[in-house]
Image: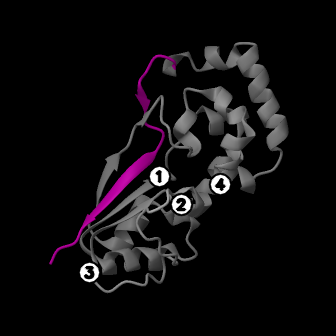
Amino acid sequence: MIKQRKVNSAEVICAKAENLPFADNAFDVALAILSVHHWFDWEDGLREMRRVARDKVVILTWNPTHEGFWLVRDYFPDILDCDRSIFPTIPAFERVLGKIDVQKVPIPHDCLDGFLGAYWRRPSAYLDPEVRSAISTFARIDNVASRRDRLRSDIENGLWARKNADILDIEQLDIGYRLIIHQIEN
């Protein structure tokens, strides 16, 4: 991601979430977007976010108690198993941060980001190796090719559209993404 930045962009500081190289209360807000599950020690990382933020901590995450969506239900159920083992639960966030506000984040059908649920209404995207390579969970599971081929077949023969007809005309879908907001009380 750093290599993709434009020349003359703001300074980049590489660090670990668990040991941020900033003074206490250095920022108004600390923000983490779909990354907590990648941290070595997410609890320490959350404490560090709270330490460096004066006003609030904001985290976009996925709720591991959510049932997921068609991709994980019908083709890659092991993604649910994998992600449920690494994503902190909502009560776990609250245990570490204290009082939190949790907001659903419905994903628009034309979402431009490349996270797992971004293509929920565009199943062909999951056939693209570049799309899958940008989704970290695909690197953790086996037998991707055979299930990708089954998805391709289901798209081509119309089975996917018949099974998912209820989502084809909606603009956004709740597939478990949540915004966690911790207001720091001074």
Q: Quarter of the image containing the N terminus?
A: bottom right
- Please state which amino acid type lies under the numbered disc 3: Asn
* Disc 3 to disc 4, C-alpha distance: 32 Å
Say whether marks 4 and 1 touch (CB < 8 Å): no
The amino acid marked with disc number 2 is: Phe
Closer to viewer: mark 3 or mark 2: 3
> What's the residue at 58%, 20% (across, down)?
164
Element on which disc 4 rests? helix
Front position in the image: 109 or 180: 109
Q: Which residue is mark 1?
A: 63
Q: Quadrant of residue 91?
A: bottom left
Which residue matches tag 4? Answer: 136
The Cα–Cα distance between marks 3 and 2, rounded to whole angstroms, is: 26 Å
> Which circle's residue, 3 or 4, is located before the other in the chain?
3
Classify residue 16 as left or right of residue 178.
right
Q: Where in the figure is residue 37, as x and y percent of width and height?
A: 54, 63
Q: Secondary structure at mark 1?
A: loop
Q: Is residue 30 above or below residue 129?
A: below
Q: Which mark is residue 25?
A: 3
Magenta part of the chain: 168-186
Q: Count residues near mark 1 (Cα–Cα under 10 Å), then give few for <14, some for 14-19, many for 20+.
A: many
Q: Earlier in the sequence, mark 2 or mark 4?
A: 2
First in sequence: mark 2 or mark 1? 1
Is 5 on the left or on the right of 160, as rendered?
Answer: left
Classed neighbour count for the residue bearing mark 2: other residues with Cα under 10 Å, few (<14), some (14–19), many (≥20): many
Residue 13: within the magenta? no
The disc placed on residue 29 is none
Q: Position of residue 12 (x, y in %)?
A: 47, 71
The amino acid marked with disc number 1 is Asn
